[in-house]
Amino acid sequence: MLKKQGNDGFTLIEILIVVMIIGLIASLIAPNIFGRFEKSKEEIAKAQVEMLSSAAQSFTLDIGRCPKELSELLSSTEKKWRGPYLSKQTIPQDPWNRDYQYKCPGDHGMFDLYTLGASGKVDDNNIKNW
């Protein structure tokens, strides 16, 4: 029997066309995915700022003053303290792995609580409790 010699594989041109099509699709989809990822970090930060603000307000109602620092939400020597005020027993870091900024008394209310956000500096894009 004679073995038939044929085209059993893909040519280099065919492979290059497929790679170009995949690259084109990836270039169209990637910006949307990364944009959503950054937006999800902002949403997480908003939720955490709300949670920490609520805990600080509960502390204030119980003790009669705002916490001097966020760690007082987890433990305190105050007689009226009814905490811990955070369910996970830890002060979370923001989604950019930085500590939340806390100031009592605040410039915008009883206390100021905010994250420096993606930029790492104070600007209009900061997520804050005021």
Image (cartoon, helix red, strand yellow):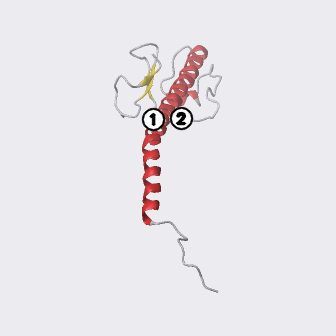
Q: Secondary structure at mark 1?
A: helix
The tag on residue 92 is 2
The CA span between labels 2 and 1 is 23 Å
**With respect to residue 98, does 47 lie above or below?**
above
Task: Judge from the rendering whether residue 18 lies leftward or rightward of residue 62; answer left or right.
Answer: left
- Residue 85: x, y in percent? 62, 26
Quarter containing the C terminus: top left
- The quadrant in which residue 83 appears is top right
Residue at x 52% of width, y 16% of height: 65
- Residue 61: x, y in percent? 59, 14
Residue nearest the viewer, comparing 126 with 51:
126
Residue at x 40% of width, y 30% of height: 116
Query: Label 1 sits on what residue type?
Result: Gly
- The quadrant in which residue 86 appears is top right
Give the crowd class for mark 2: few <14, some 14-19, many >=20 residues within 10 Å. some
* Residue reaching furthest to the bottom: 1
Give the crowd class for mark 1: few <14, some 14-19, many >=20 residues within 10 Å. few
The tag on residue 112 is none
Residue nearest the viewer, comparing 91 with 51:
51
Residue at x 46% of width, y 36% of height: 32
Query: Label 2 sits on what residue type?
Result: Pro
Residue nearest the viewer, comparing 36 with 85:
36
Residue at x 49% of width, y 37% of height: 37
Mark yes or no: residue 13 visible. Answer: yes
Q: Secondary structure at mark 2?
A: loop
Quarter containing the N terminus: bottom right
The tag on residue 35 is 1
